[in-house]
C-alpha cells in the first residue's frame, strides 16, 4: 500500500512539474493538476498538502542532488579540469532526468516560502564550491588567468539552460553532449 501511495505522489509531482514548466507555477491551480491527472481536486490532498509542498519537493530534491554531486566532486583528488568535466556531466545528467523540474528550479524558486532560505543557501554553496574549483585551476595554471566570476557565469548560464535545449534534440547521446560541452566550455573553441 505504501508503495502505491508513493507512486501516486511521484506521479502528482511529475505532472505538476510539467504543468509548472508549461504554464508557470503561479498560473497552475490544484484543479488544473487534478484535471490533468483525471481525478478530483480533493483527491490530491490524500497525497500532498499544497501546491507549495509540490514545488518544495521538486526544487529542493534537485538542489540537494546538485549539492551532493558537487560535494563528491570537490572532495576528490582530481585536477581542476577533471572536476569541471564531472560538473558538466552532473548538469547534463540531472537536467536530462529532470527537464520539467529544472524549469521550476530556475524559474519558480522565488515562490518557495518555507524552503526559500534553505534553497538560497544550497545555491550559494554550490556556486562558491564551483568558484573555488575555478580559482584552484587558475592558481595551478590549468586555466587561463581571467576573472573566475566571468567563467562561473558563462559556464553556469549554459549548464542551467540545458533543460530548454535537451528536449529539442532527438537521439541525443548524453555522454557525447557532456564531452562536447567540456570541449567548448573548458578547452575553448580555438583551433
Image (tube, rainbow, N blue to C red):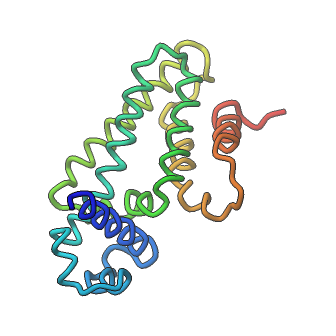
10, above or below 19, in the image: above
In the image, 132: left or right of 113?
right
23, above or below 145, in the image: below
Q: Position of residue 185 (x, y in %)?
A: 64, 38
Most foreground residue, 44 or 54? 44
Q: Position of residue 82 (x, y in %)?
A: 58, 23
Q: Residue at x 43, y 71 (%)?
A: 18
Most foreground residue, 96 or 104? 96
The residue positioned farthest toward the front in the image shown = 1
Q: Residue at x 37, y 42 (%)?
A: 65
Most foreground residue, 143 or 39? 39
In the image, 158: left or right of 132?
right
In the image, 142: left or right of 75?
right
Q: Position of residue 61 (x, y in %)?
A: 31, 50
17, above or below 33, in the image: above
Residue 53 sits in quarter: bottom left
| Number of marks | 0
Residue 129 sits in quarter: top left
Query: In what quadrant of the picture does the N terminus appear?
Result: bottom left
In the image, 168: left or right of 6?
right
The residue positioned farthest toward the right in the image shown = 191
Q: Residue at x 70, y 40 (%)?
A: 180
Q: Position of residue 124 (x, y in %)?
A: 32, 40
Most foreground residue, 186 or 114? 114
153, above or below 14, in the image: above
Q: Residue at x 44, y 57 (%)?
A: 102
Query: In what quadrant of the picture does the C terminus appear?
Result: top right
Amino acid at each position: 500500500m505504501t508503495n502505491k501511495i508513493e507512486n501516486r505522489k511521484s506521479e502528482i509531482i511529475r505532472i505538476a512539474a510539467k504543468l509548472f514548466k508549461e504554464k508557470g507555477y503561479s498560473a497552475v491551480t490544484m484543479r488544473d493538476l487534478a484535471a490533468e491527472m483525471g481525478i478530483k481536486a480533493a483527491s490530491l490532498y490524500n497525497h500532498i498538502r499544497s501546491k507549495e509542498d509540490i514545488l518544495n519537493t521538486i526544487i529542493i530534491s534537485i538542489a540537494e542532488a546538485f549539492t551532493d554531486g558537487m560535494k563528491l566532486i570537490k572532495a576528490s583528488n582530481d585536477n581542476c579540469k577533471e572536476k569541471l568535466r564531472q560538473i558538466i556531466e552532473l548538469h547534463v545528467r540531472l537536467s536530462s532526468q529532470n527537464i520539467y523540474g529544472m524549469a521550476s528550479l530556475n524559474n519558480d524558486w522565488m515562490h518557495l516560502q518555507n524552503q526559500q532560505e534553505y534553497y538560497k543557501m544550497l545555491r550559494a554553496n554550490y556556486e562558491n564550491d564551483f568558484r573555488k574549483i575555478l580559482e584552484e585551476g587558475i592558481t595551478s595554471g590549468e586555466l587561463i588567468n581571467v576573472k573566475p566570476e566571468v567563467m562561473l557565469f558563462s559556464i553556469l548560464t549554459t549548464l542551467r539552460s540545458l533543460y530548454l535545449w535537451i528536449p529539442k534534440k532527438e537521439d541525443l547521446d548524453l555522454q557525447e553532449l557532456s564531452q562536447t560541452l567540456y570541449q567548448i566550455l573548458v578547452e575553448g573553441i580555438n583551433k
